[in-house]
Amino acid sequence: MKRKVIIAIIILISCLCVAVTINFNRPSPQPVQDETQSSQQPKPKFTDQQIGILAGLATSPEWLKQNIAGNQLVYGIVKPSDTVPAGVADYSYLVAADDQDGTVIFFKEEGQTVIIKYTSQRNTKLKTKDLTLSQLKKEFYQTRSQKREVDDYVAGLRTE
């Protein structure tokens, strides 16, 4: 009887060793991601002023560069007391201090999207453009020189 018990214990220990060996050789399970998670890239991090410069480059690059060069570009956030077109009450903006041509760029970050509403040459009707932060980064903030240019423009902004 003792012999059968000892044989049974040896068989159980052998089975346990085989099971442990199999588990150690099996690749560890990877967490499952749904397709929306795995396809999303990390959200680029920008200051509001950088987003304004990127919005300006996307809509009116010559106007932006000209006003930065002339130390005329003003960055601000719409206040309740400001007289602005409907639909931009919670936006930030860029405007030329001398306001010669009536160009104004309003912009707002919403999640991964930047909503840009702008007027040009005294045209009072707002045009709208929606761009993702990734699109703006890819087009205007990719290379070292682009990053330096944008950051230099930000440094040249006047505030209201």
Image (spheres, rainbow, N blue to C red):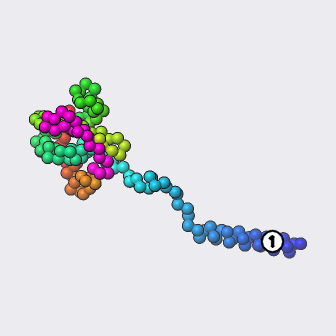
Residue 73 appears anywhere in the view:
yes
For image coordinates 10% across by 35% down, the residue present is 100
Tell me the residue at 56%/67% (across/down). 27
Quarter of the image where the C terminus is located: top left
x%, y% of residue 136? 27, 50
Of residues 16 and 110, which is closer to you in this image? 110
Residue furthest toward the top? 81
**In the displayed structure, does residue 21 sit left or right of residue 149?**
right
Residue assigned mark 1: 8
In the displayed structure, 146 sits above or below 77; it is below
What span is colored magenta in the figure? 116-136
* Residue drawn where x is 87% and y is 72% of the image: 2
Quarter holding the N terminus is bottom right
Above or below: residue 134 compared with residue 97: below
Residue 108 pos. (x, y %): 30, 39
Residue 92 occupies quadrant? top left
- Tell me residue 110's x, y (percent): 35, 41
Q: In front: 51, or 12?
A: 51
Q: Amino acid at mark 1?
A: Ala
Relative side of 4 to 131, left or right = right
Residue 122, magenta (yes or no)? yes
